[in-house]
């Protein structure tokens, strides 16, 4: 701890008023602090303090940081009248005694997130100077209207609480510019409105004040389950209000959408195909606030077969749990007409028991990990991971009792649906199923439906945003309000409008089914058969020949790449006879320059990767990224890589060669497993980032500045991880450069993880002794790992081996950290954040081409 004392002494000598005693494992407040009344700023972050007393002696204190400790009681700080910044986040505080906050008249910033508060601190309204307030990750149920008196409040964070309503007066605060309230069971305004941001919420309340309101009783219902389980039979029978029999060759391809009314509720049904090939596109449309109907084939289900449960039930429960962890799942047993009555009851009981075992095992695994981290000698370095585990434990996936249904009888289907309706009406199960909306929201929805019914829009329902805004011309709704309402309709699944994608923000899909139709022409289980089935007549018409077709098929089989021309011909062939759809499909698919909107969507969601790039031009002797330079005119055909179709690792193995003893090597472990399609998305984000790359089945290799980075997916039960290996120049150790490349890849992976809020991951470094199975746990990524860097040698607890710390962890060599990364790492990432460029200077040789790169300018957008 000598270095800690040295650091404290240096800080105090420099300022005389600032004291940093963070991460010292303090259990009591040191007396030397309490004897120094001149302290202005006191940092006690990441210690083990359970109680702090006598802080009232520090009468000149302006900043007090007590985050990431073990405080249960709110500290006695009422006499700190000059206090401006108070951080108490990530503790165990349950309530704030009355009378303390009003005695802090100058308080500007208050962090209370990740505690156990059940009530909003009522007397906080006395802190009139407050500008920043974070109450996220508590269990607060209500925010009082009096919060509006905090006229200087600029930022408010209340995500992940138990709020059902937000006070209208809150949004009258003119200074408020940042507001986040996601992961609350909100009815007023609905969560889909809050997801649109502060201005959309203000628009919502403004319309409530000037228009009538109504109760919206629409339930987005997602039908999931294995192929041929009976999802479509159930969904279509309900929609058409009669028994519908689905032939095997009519099974769902991709996703189908239908809506039907039952009494006072409307169900917007999304029928998802069961083949794993289609699951890659499911995450694009699976959203929170939905009822998940998991259809299970009771005839196929085998109680004694572990794989049967995993395929028909476990896979789907796990992926829902990771993607939308607060969902309601209703299992429905289909094909019961092929089972006897006792068999159905036995299987029903077996499925329900195994689902409960799954959820219990998950909870136990999280608790075990939690205990392990808290028992570590330096547990303060893992506090962010601990809080993430607490958050994951709070998620409560509700799985209702299984309902057996004989799908050959319409009366049995209706009887089952009445049971579902009864569950939907239960506010304990669905606390926010009834949403309060301004009547203008329904007016816009009705106007859009009328446009479709009267065929005032094209049959495919794809229109330009500006055109739609002119078509929906309603009184009392201005252009901006209309955009906000369209955003809401997109989030509930009625229309599709990817306004966050720059090239798509001007296009609205009033019929999501058309967009999905194009999806399923490209992402499908029988794509190879479809490519083979293109007739010679169609090829000839599109100026292609049989050898072209064979090239497309071979590239798809061996490289999982689809040629743009092949896709165009395939879609035109499947849409023959419908000129309107063919014309729109051509617009969405684009040309050989890669301007197609459909592929922009697929790339945005990490489903495919475009090969679009400019070939090196021998005549362009100076290369300046961002500036136009003449093309060589020898551009290869545009193709798209779909990693999910890859079948071998040959190309990656050829370029990686063998693992080396000096490789930097870390693993990211996942609970409960790696989600289907997750690794493909990480791969695409990484390859979009670094031009030199090779991709194989469950493998990805990128090369930057001579450094090779290999990613490998291992997805086994209780042992799911992604392996990261990095090797550099054999003659140089280059630890800093290799760690920067590794950390860049980790950051890309973390961005993908954000889309699976129920997924837990942890970073570990394997012991350098290949015979040892021990792992070194990584501390929180967004914290300074300087404590580890003071220890140049780490000893394995299992084999006793001693290893240089720089081989095990990314070391902060004294650089300033920015968002958890040193500036060196930040700059390295910036250099690699140029798509399809070469981040080198000097002479770059590619084949017969030599380009002199004199200078480059890089800009990093965090």
Image: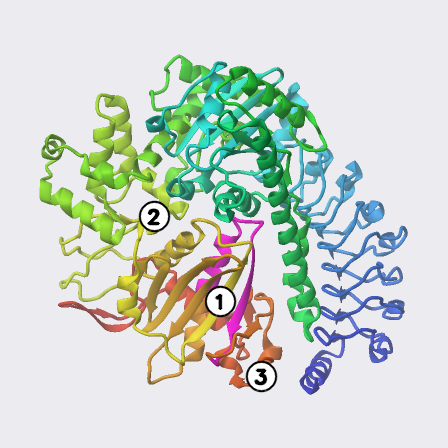
Looking at the image, how many numbered discs can be counted on the residues? 3
615 in relation to 125, above or below: below
* Residue 745, picture quadrant: bottom left
Q: CA distance from mark 3 to mark 2?
A: 43 Å
Instruction: Say few, some or many: other residues with alpha carbon within 10 Å of mark 1 (under 14 / 14 to 19 / 20 or more).
Output: many
User: Which residue occupies the foreground of this view, 259 or 356?
Assistant: 356
467 in relation to 331, above or below: above
Q: Position of residue 65 (x, y in %)?
A: 74, 65
For marks 2 and 1, give the one nearer the viewer. 1
Say which element carries label 1. Answer: strand
Say which element carries label 3. Answer: strand
The magenta stretch spans which residues?
745-769
107 in relation to 125, above or below: below
Where residue 795 is drawn, which disc sits there? Answer: 3
User: Which residue occupies the foreground of this view, 455 or 726?
Assistant: 726
- Residue at image position (61%, 15%) is 263
The answer to whether mark 1 and mark 3 are in CB contact below 8 A is no
User: Which residue occupies the foreground of this view, 821 or 327?
Assistant: 327
The residue labelled by disc 2 is 608
First of labels 3, 2 by sequence position? 2
The residue labelled by disc 1 is 667
Instruction: Say few, some or many: other residues with alpha carbon within 10 Å of mark 3 (under 14 / 14 to 19 / 20 or more).
Output: some
């Amino acid at each position: 701890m000598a270095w800690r004392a040295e650091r404290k002494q240096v800080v105090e000598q420099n300022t005389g008023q600032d004291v940093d005693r963070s991460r010292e494992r303090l259990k009591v407040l040191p007396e030397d602090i309490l004897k120094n009344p001149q302290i202005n700023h006191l940092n006690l972050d990441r210690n083990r303090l359970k109680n702090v007393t006598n802080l009232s002696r520090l009468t000149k204190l302006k900043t007090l940081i007590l985050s990431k400790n073990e405080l249960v009681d709110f500290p006695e700080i009422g006499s700190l009248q000059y206090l401006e910044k108070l951080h108490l986040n990530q503790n165990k505080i349950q309530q704030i005694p009355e009378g303390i906050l009003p005695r802090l008249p100058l308080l500007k910033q208050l962090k209370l997130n990740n505690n156990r508060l059940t009530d909003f601190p009522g007397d906080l309204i006395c802190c009139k100077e407050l500008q920043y307030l974070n109450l996220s990750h508590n269990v607060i149920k209500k925010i009082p209207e009096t919060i509006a008196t905090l006229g200087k409040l600029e930022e408010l964070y209340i995500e992940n609480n138990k709020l059902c309503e937000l006070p209208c007066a809150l949004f009258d605060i003119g200074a408020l510019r940042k507001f986040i309230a996601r992961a609350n069971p909100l009815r007023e305004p609905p969560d889909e409105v809050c997801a649109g941001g502060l201005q959309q919420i203000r628009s919502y309340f403004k319309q409530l004040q000037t228009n009538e309101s109504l109760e919206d009783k629409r339930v987005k219902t997602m039908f999931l389950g294995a192929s041929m389980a009976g999802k479509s039979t159930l969904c279509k029978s309900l929609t058409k209000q009669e028994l519908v029999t689905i032939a095997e060759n009519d099974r769902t391809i991709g996703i189908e959408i239908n809506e039907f009314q039952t009494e006072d509720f409307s169900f917007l049904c999304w029928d998802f195909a069961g083949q794993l090939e289609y699951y890659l596109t499911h995450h694009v449309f699976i959203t929170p606030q939905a009822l998940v109907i998991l259809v299970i084939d009771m005839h196929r289900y085998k109680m004694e077969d572990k794989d049967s449960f995993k395929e028909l039930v476990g896979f789907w429960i796990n992926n829902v749990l990771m993607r939308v962890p607060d969902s309601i799942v209703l299992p429905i047993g289909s094909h019961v007409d092929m089972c006897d009555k006792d068999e159905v009851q036995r299987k029903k009981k077996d499925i329900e028991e195994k689902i409960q075992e799954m959820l219990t095992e998950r909870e136990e695994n999280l608790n075990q990990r939690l205990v392990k981290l808290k028992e570590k000698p330096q547990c303060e370095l893992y506090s962010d991971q601990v809080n993430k585990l607490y958050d994951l434990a709070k998620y409560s996936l509700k799985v209702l009792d299984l309902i057996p249904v004989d799908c050959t009888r319409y009366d049995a289907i209706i009887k089952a649906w009445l049971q579902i309706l009864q569950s939907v009406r239960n506010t304990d199960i669905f606390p926010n199923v009834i949403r309060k909306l301004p009547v203008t929201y329904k007016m816009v929805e009705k106007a859009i439906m009328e446009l479709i019914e009267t065929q005032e829009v094209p049959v495919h329902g794809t229109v330009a945003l500006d055109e739609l805004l002119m078509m929906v011309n309603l009184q009392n709704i201005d252009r901006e309000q209309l955009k906000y309402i369209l955003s809401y309709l997109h989030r509930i699944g009625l229309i599709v409008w990817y306004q966050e994608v720059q090239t798509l923000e001007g296009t609205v899909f009033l019929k999501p089914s058309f967009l999905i139709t194009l999806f399923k022409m490209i992402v499908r289980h029988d794509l190879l058969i479809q490519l083979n089935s293109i007739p010679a007549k169609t090829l000839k018409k599109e100026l292609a020949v049989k050898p072209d077709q064979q090239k497309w098929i071979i590239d798809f089989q061996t490289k999982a790449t689809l040629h743009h021309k092949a896709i165009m011909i395939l879609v035109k062939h499947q849409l023959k006879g419908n000129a309107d759809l063919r014309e729109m499909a051509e617009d969405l698919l684009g040309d050989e320059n890669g301007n197609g909107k459909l592929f922009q969507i697929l790339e945005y969601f990490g489903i495919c990767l475009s090969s679009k790039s400019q070939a090196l031009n021998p005549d362009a002797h100076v290369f300046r990224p961002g500036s136009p330079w003449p093309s060589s005119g020898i551009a290869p055909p545009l193709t798209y890589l779909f990693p999910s179709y890859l079948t071998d690792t040959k190309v990656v193995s050829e370029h990686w060669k063998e693992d080396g003893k000096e490789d930097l090597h870390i693993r990211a472990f996942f609970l409960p497993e790696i989600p289907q399609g997750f690794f493909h998305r990480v791969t695409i984000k990484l390859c979009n980032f670094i031009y030199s790359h090779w991709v194989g089945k469950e493998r990805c290799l990128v090369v930057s500045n001579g450094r090779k980075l290999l990613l490998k997916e291992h997805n086994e039960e209780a042992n799911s991880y992604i392996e990261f290996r990095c090797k550099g120049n054999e003659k140089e150790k280059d630890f800093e450069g290799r760690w920067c490349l590794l950390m860049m890849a980790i950051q890309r992976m973390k961005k993908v993880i954000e889309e699976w809020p129920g997924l837990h991951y942890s970073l570990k470094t394997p012991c350098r002794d290949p015979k040892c199975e021990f792992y070194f746990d990584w501390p929180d990524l967004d914290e300074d790992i300087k404590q580890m860097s003071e220890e140049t040698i780490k000893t394995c607890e299992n084999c006793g081996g001693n290893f240089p710390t720089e081989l095990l962890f990314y070391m902060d060599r004294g650089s300033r950290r920015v968002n958890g990364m040193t500036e060196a790492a930040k700059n390295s990432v910036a250099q690699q954040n140029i798509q399809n460029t070469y981040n080198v200077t000097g002479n770059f040789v590619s084949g017969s081409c030599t380009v002199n790169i004199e200078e480059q300018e890089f800009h990093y957008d965090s």
